Amino acid sequence: MDDINRLLAKAGRGDGAALESLYRQLGNGVYCLALSILGEKGAAEDVLQETFVRVWTMAHTHSPGKSGRSWILAIARNLCLDRLRAAQNAGPSQEGEEERSGSEALSFVDNLELKDALGKLEEQARKIVVLHLAAGFKFREIAALLGEKQSRVQRAYYAGVEQLSAYYTIQ
């Protein structure tokens, strides 16, 4: 049993320190995933909090033989998808709020040049590159989160990196 699964088992028995350790280990990855899907810092922070509330209340249901990391990331992904569906069903805001662009998902990147380069990638490739490089997800985990084949994720990643490389070569 890996460390994440052990911590989940402890959290399932009410161990708050185990939940805190899970948050320290996976919080950044959950936030990056939510930010890449939702494209808004505030919404990503909300999903981060909601994810770990769910982990706390549902840890006892996790199957020890399954990947705890994937289980937690699936909770975050589902919360993001729920938010997107709710936003679609609500329609345009009555307050005239401007729609936020997907480029807000890149606001955590301090380097403006890198931000510009990432903005030139297709949305799916950008998500994959950010999840792999910034959040440290493995290709199989990204494939599971995005509902894609691992080979497709790897091709999109390498194509995205090649585009980034070409961007910097031209500059």
Image (cartoon, helix red, strand yellow):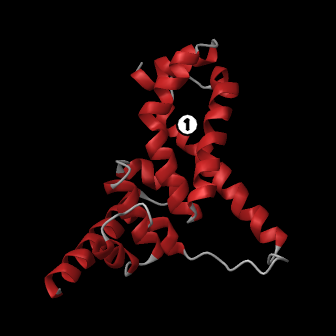
* Camera sees residue 112: yes
Q: Amino acid at mark 1?
A: Trp
User: Is 11 placed above or below 69 here?
Assistant: above
- What's the residue at 65%, 20% (across, down)? 60
Q: Is residue 82 left or right of residue 8?
A: right
- What's the residue at 58%, 13% (across, down)? 15
Question: Quadrant where the C terminus lies?
Answer: bottom left
Q: Is residue 121 left or right of residue 124?
A: left
- What's the residue at 65%, 50% (across, down)? 78
Q: Which residue is mark 1?
A: 71
Numbered marks: total: 1
Tell me where residue 87 appears, x and y as whole percent.
Answer: 76, 67
Q: For residue 44, which quarter of the picture?
A: bottom right
Q: For residue 3, which quarter of the picture?
A: top left
Tell me where residue 89 appears, x and y as whole percent.
Answer: 82, 69
* Camera sees residue 147: no
In this orientation, which residue lies closer to the viewer: 148 or 58? 58
Q: Residues within 10 Å of mark 1 (few under 14, many from 20)?
A: some
Tell me where residue 135 appears, x and y as whole percent.
Answer: 38, 50
User: Is 65 placed above or below 167 here?
Assistant: above
In this orientation, which residue lies closer to the viewer: 79 or 141? 79
User: Is 147 placed above or below 31 here?
Assistant: below
